[in-house]
Image (cartoon, grey):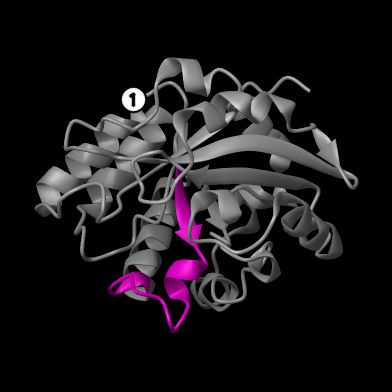
Amino acid sequence: MKILMDLHTHTVASGHAYSSLEANINVAKERGLKYYGLSEHGPKMPGAPHIYYYSNMRIIPREMNGIRVLRGVEANILDYDGTIDMIPESLEYIDYVIASSHPPCMNYGTSQENTDALINAMKHPKVFIIGHPDDDRFPLDYPRLVKAAKEHDVLLEINNSSLNPIGFRKHAKDNIEEILKLCMKENYPVILSSDAHISVDVGNFNYIMPILSKLKFPDELIINYFPEKFLKMIKFIK
């Protein structure tokens, strides 16, 4: 089957990424994607856009170079109550929120505290994806997390960037394998993401694919093969 969607990508607007929106979409087109999601970092990340940026996402066309464009944000989780750094006014034109734990925005906690933070973030009506829950700097109770994701109809992200040998997230491969095994047990889908910070990485899942093959992870539990399922989840109006 073919991956048709990549919803976790960044442009120069995020402050530490290196390509334009147009460059990212051109690579998405080259790689055969049908859906591209822009998800800049939320405003509490150093270098991230001003809060006005997210409201103005309404001007981004719904189709560019033959690619359907979704408007997202990678919001920062700020505390163990799951508070994210977005206000309702700035989410009006955003289709989906990826909620992630990042060291500049949140203190490392215990497994229980970190898991509480992610589960509480899942309760936000715009949060549909938990970003890179694979970093041992934020240890997690994975059985509890997967059950909560299924309960709240939120997807756990399998992040290609986390698996990059030059990456900085700790023990990501082992943690990703545990997430995948638990999702198979629960018969609950995951979403694959590039977390591209440069255009050449858009639609790049090269580090993920060997793990999926090794575990014999079912195609039907990979939401990227079935974009309409995600659009239905977020109640996307074309």
Horizontal and vertical percent position of residue 28? 77, 58
Specify the amino acid type for callout 1.
Lys
Q: Quadrant of residue 92?
A: top right
Near-viewer residue (210 or 195): 195
Tell me, yes or no, if residue 9 can be seen here.
no
Give the magenta range: 155-172
Whether residue 193 sits left or right of residue 119 in the image: it is right
- Residue 205 part of the magenta segment: no
Residue 146's place in the image compared with 199, above or below, is: above
Q: Quadrant of residue 88?
A: top left
Q: Residues within 10 Å of mark 1 (few under 14, many from 20)?
A: some
Q: Quadrant of the C terminus?
A: top right
Secondary-structure class at tag 1:
loop
- Residue 156 part of the magenta segment: yes
Residue at the right extreme of this rendering: 66
Q: Residue at x 59, y 59 (%)?
A: 218
Residue 97's place in the image compared with 236, above or below, is: below
Near-viewer residue (232 or 70): 70
Whether residue 151 sits left or right of residue 211 in the image: it is left
Q: Residue at x 56, y 78 (%)?
A: 210
Q: Quadrant of residue 38?
A: top right
Horizontal and vertical percent position of residue 237? 73, 19
Residue 184's place in the image compared with 56, above or below, is: below
Q: Quadrant of the N terminus?
A: bottom right
Horizontal and vertical percent position of residue 129? 46, 41
Residue behind mark 1? 123
Q: Residue at x 9, y 53 (%)?
A: 110
Q: Residue at x 33, y 70 (%)?
A: 169
